[in-house]
Image: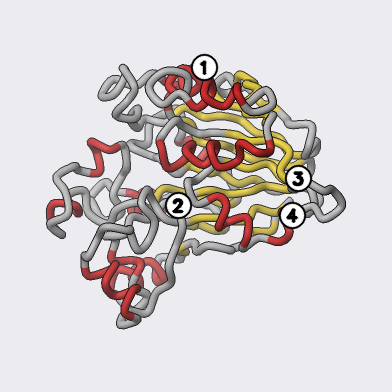
Amino acid sequence: MQIKVLGSAAGGGFPQWNCNCANCQGVRNGTMKTSARTQSSIAVSDDGKNWVLCNVSPDICHQLLASPELHNPEVLRGTGIGAIILTDSQIDHSAGLLNLREGCPHHVWCTPEVHEDLSTGFPVFPMLTHWNGGLIHHAIAPLERFQTRVCPTVQFTAIPLLSNAPPYSPYRGRPLPGHNVALFIEEEGGKSLLYAPGLGEPDDAILPWLERADVLLIDGTLWRDNELAATGVGHNTGKAMGHLALSEEQGLAALLARLPAERKILIHINNTNPILNEESPERRFLHQQGIEVSHDGMVIAL
């Protein structure tokens, strides 16, 4: 099984199109050792030819262009993507569905809560019915293992996360368990990976899966909970957005230090996060702790 990181940044990408913070200026003018990143999405395959797309970023067309292994030159129209799984209904994980309209119908696995948000507040499901049948919904239930036909040896389990629903959801500020899930991904007889790009708070539901996974691909959105205010670009805290900051006393770095995973890799990294600077003290700290920072194009072989 292999997992390819198509996009490693949080919503807006890096640099964010309208941001002139120190990080975004540094990547634009080449004064900071770093690399540009598109918005968070991964692809999973058991044969290197057929793929399951996990979250569909607004940057999906650029990501596919940069990933020839996801192409399928044997057909006149088509790619190697045979299934789509959504971990939530946030714009940065679902807006790319609109870009894939020419390839409809698509089989999309998501919880009923995510499907409801994407049928009402951000109605991509009804919108895309006008393109060759649109999106075919497959409901997933938390903690129930499921498979897709395209990668039959790979098994997925959706684990509820304490996070938040998107602003267009009536459950913003009071999410249900299905509004945000992590994906526990395993292959028969092989190793496992937990993909959790929206971890707000570790609880008894997610902790056993964090301890069980061989590889963690996990929410690295912010270094500090008040990072947006501290950099002058916003007012939301990490907690309000549903993201556990790395450096807090009970933050993600402290949590990762207690976990036995072979690899601990951060994804969904906000443009303000100092770990994007490869020469920063924060990045050196992560390296000392054995924590990796994902980048676009990163391949994880299991």
Under mark 1, the amino acid is: Pro
* In front of the other: 284 or 297: 297
- Tell me which numbered mark, 4 or 3, is placed earlier along the sequence: 4
Q: Picture coordinates of residue 213 (x, y %)? A: 58, 45
* In front of the other: 51 or 185: 51
Asked which secondary structure carries label 4, the reply is: loop
* In front of the other: 218 or 70: 70
Q: Mark 1 to mark 3: distance in Å? A: 28 Å
Residue 211 seen in the current view: no
The label nearer to you, 1 versus 2, is 2
Residue 71: assigned label: 4
Query: Eyeballing the image, is 172 above or below 233?
Result: above
Q: Picture coordinates of residue 107 (x, y %)? A: 68, 29
Under mark 4, the amino acid is: His
The label nearer to you, 1 versus 3, is 3
Do the residues under discs 4 and 3 have CB atoms within 8 angstroms? no
Residue 39: assigned label: 2
Q: Quadrant of residue 137?
A: top right
The residue drawn where x is 68% and y is 41% is 52
- Tell me which numbered mark, 1 or 4, is placed earlier along the sequence: 4
